[in-house]
Structure formats: structure tokens, C-alpha cells
Amino acid sequence: MKKEIERPFNNGRWTAGEMNTFIKSLLRSGTRRWGPKNETLKKARVEKGKYLCNGCKTVVPVTIVKDGKRVRFVQVDHIIPVVDTDTGFVSWDNYINRMFSNSDNYQLLCSDCHYSKTSSERMIATERKKRDKNTNG
């Protein structure tokens, strides 16, 4: 028999995971107007439409054409990840404080450097989850 999934949010439509995803999405959209993040973008600007990547130290365009579409090629990245790769999600207070950090925790990366950094962080988190599952389960 199939176990019934508990859906305590949004009038019984959402699970706890769906609610968390919704809240994270709202917080991420709020960072578009966060001053320190925009200051980092401004400081990395070399000339109109070109920025210095803090990873590979090359000057890159803000957008490139990929598969016939113009896509953003620079990312303002948290130096210290919002969710620590070694401990995972701790609390909403911790998440919000890390999400809306000061300028010294932001860097501008080209999409290639950002992808590389994010991939390595995901690998560390995946290994932690496997380790935690083996010790707890």
C-alpha cells in the first residue's frame, strides 16, 4: 500500500519540501535588489558590458549568444555558500543571514567559473549526504 504524503501547506497542496522551495525562490528573487550584491557587480565592471571574473581573472561580456539566444554570462556569487556544504541546511535564520551578506562575501564569476565552483560544492554536499545516510541509516 502506498504511503500518503503529508501536505500541510498551501491548503493541503504542498509538502514541506515544496514550501521550502517556494520560500527559497522568494528570497533569491529578493537578492536582485540587495545593495551589496549590486555593488559587487559595479566594482567588477571594466567597461560597458564587460566585467572582470574573479575566478579566471579574464574580462568577460555580461551576455553571450548561445544556441541563438542571448544569455547572461556573469554571476554574482556568494564566496561562502548560502548552505554550507559540510553541514547542510541549519536554519532559516542562518540561510537568510548568509543569503543577504555584506559585500565581502560576494564575487563576480563568469558562468564557466560559477559552474565549476557550484559543481564542486554539490559534489561535497552529495558526499556528506551519503556519509550521513550511512552513519544514520
Image: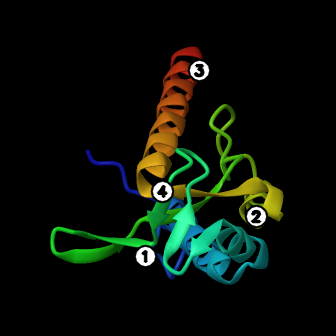
Q: Nearer the viewer, mark 1 or mark 2?
A: 2
Mark 1 highlights which residue? 13
Measured as percent of width and height from the top left, residue 20 is found at: 57, 64
Q: Quadrant of residue 65?
A: bottom left
Amino acid bearing label 3: Asn
Mark 3 highlights which residue? 136
Q: Earlier in the sequence, mark 4 or mark 3?
A: 4
SS of the residue under disc 4: strand
The quarter in which the N terminus is drawn is: top left
Q: Earlier in the sequence, mark 3 or mark 2?
A: 2
Q: Residue at horizontal 65%, vertical 71%?
A: 41
Q: Quadrant of residue 40?
A: bottom right
Real-space CA distance between mark 1 and mark 2, rounded to the nearest whole angstrom: 25 Å
Amino acid bearing label 2: Ile
Tell me if residue 123 comes above or below residue 20 in the rendering.
above
SS of the residue under disc 2: helix
The answer to whether 103 appears left or right of 86 in the picture is right
Amino acid bearing label 4: Cys
Mark 2 highlights which residue? 96
